[in-house]
Amino acid sequence: MTMAQPKEFTGRKMLLIMITFFGVIIAVNGYMAFSAVSTFPGLEVDNSYVASQQFNERASAQRALGWESEIAYDEGELVLQLQDANGVVLPGNIVAKIGRPTFAGEDIELTFRLVGEEYRAEAALTPGPWRLFLDATAQDGTLYKQRLPLTVEAD
């Protein structure tokens, strides 16, 4: 009975293993970099230095308003509670957009209407995390800006 000879491990086999190993790593890294760049929503502000210089002033003015805001999702509608420090519903100019926290492709401009003591806007949202970008203007011209997180649960 003859014994089978073990296959020889050559430099060529080692080269193919190394090329395959690093090729897979480079391909995955390339795919991940492409995915990250293609889904990046872009800049929040045009000039971050100028925005940072005005931030504290705007934040103080907004806190002085004493406004409170909450968002909920109810059967195809967003429900926004916007009240002053005394709990009075605020009528006014509201500009809002809702979108995914990391992907601008699903952003939706919203039109809120006052129904009783809350604002409502139609929006067909799929399950998962969302973020509402809310801008409202007080009667004295003070801008109220909020980013409100919202999670839509699967049925």
Image (tube, rainbow, N blue to C red):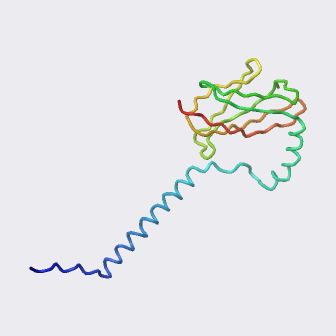
Nearer to me, 138 or 84: 84
Question: Left of 138 or right of it: where is 69?
Answer: left
Q: Left or right? Give the position of 28 relative to 11.
A: right
| Residue 55 placement (x, y as % from top left) | 84, 48
Q: Hey, which residue is sitting farthest left in the picture?
A: 1
* Horizontal and vertical percent position of residue 60: 89, 43
Task: Tell me the quarter of the picture where residue 7 sits.
Answer: bottom left
Looking at the image, residue 102 sits to the left or right of residue 112; the answer is left
In the image, 10 versus 124, the foreground residue is 10
At horizontal 73% and vertical 18% (from top left) the residue drawn is 115
Q: Quadrant of residue 3?
A: bottom left
Quadrant where the N terminus is found in the figure: bottom left
Farthest residue to the top: give it.
116
Q: Position of residue 8 (x, y in %)?
A: 25, 81
Residue 40, image x, y percentages: 60, 51
- Residue at the (68%, 39%) spot, across then down: 149
Would you place residue 96 above or below residue 101 in this image?
Answer: above
Residue shown at the point (48%, 58%) measured from the top left: 31
Front residue of 32/69: it is: 69
Give the answer, above or below, for where 114 lies relative to 144.
above
Q: Which residue is found at the position 57% from the left and 34% from the top?
A: 153
